[in-house]
Amino acid sequence: MICVIILLAIDSGHIRKGRTGMSSTYKKGYTDKKTIEYIKNNYDQVSLRVPKGDREKYKRLAEVQGKSLNQMIIELLDAENERVLKEEQAKRVITYAERINEKVATLSVNKEHYSIFQIGNTRIKFYSSPFLTKYCEILKWDDTGYIECTCLNTNSDGLVEDSIDLAFIADRLHLPLDIFKGIEEVRIV
């Protein structure tokens, strides 16, 4: 039923006076220039073909619900669009959860002063201190995204303790809040 109605939405170029505030004479060419300009600037027109007699059937269905055919089609399309978006979002969260099941993540730094936290195929890359040369040891990890570690810096002698709040970084990247759940260990590479 949805497929037929989606196709029907494309045929909703018919304009009815009173429902949209526009005259049905638009298609006949009798409206004033302001109305034509308003329609041109504010609406897209789409059309479709349905089997003979189906248009009236769908029109009656819309009238029973107290709506115009155009209004009913737009509402159905909006509802379908929202359902598909929710479905896609759910798939995205599941994908991250599956990657997290690896239980082990890695932390490294490159020559361009970026740190890289990797969970399976997901890499979170963030800017580090220009003095950071190497991460040495993970002192503390919790699965909320907080790391305490030791590292070597060019501006100090010996090891320096540092902390990284990956949850803050992940939030700014619009990653799921539970991305770090299930990671039991972080290794330095």
Image (cartoon, rainbow, N blue to C red):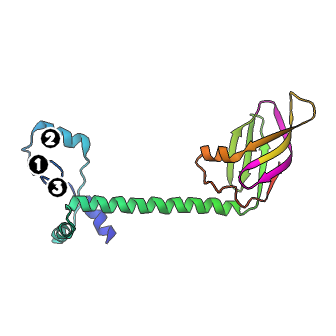
- Residue under circle 3? 14
Q: Nearer the viewer, residue 16 or 181?
A: 181
Q: Residue at x 15, y 69 (%)?
A: 56
Q: Amino acid at mark 3?
A: His
Gap between marks 2 and 3 measured at Cα: 15 Å
Q: Classify mark 3: residues with Cα within 10 Å, few (<14), some (14-19) or many (20+).
A: few
Residue 57's place in the image compared with 172, above or below, is below
- Residue under circle 1? 23
Residue 120 figure quarter: bottom right
Q: Amino acid at mark 2?
A: Thr
Q: Residue furthest left?
A: 30
Residue 143, position as x, y percentages in the image: 73, 56
Single out the mark in the foreground, 2 or 3. Answer: 2
Residue 89, position as x, y percentages in the image: 52, 58
Q: Are marks 1 and 2 in contact (CB under 8 Å)?
A: yes
- Residue under circle 2? 35
Q: Classify mark 2: residues with Cα within 10 Å, few (<14), some (14-19) or many (20+).
A: some
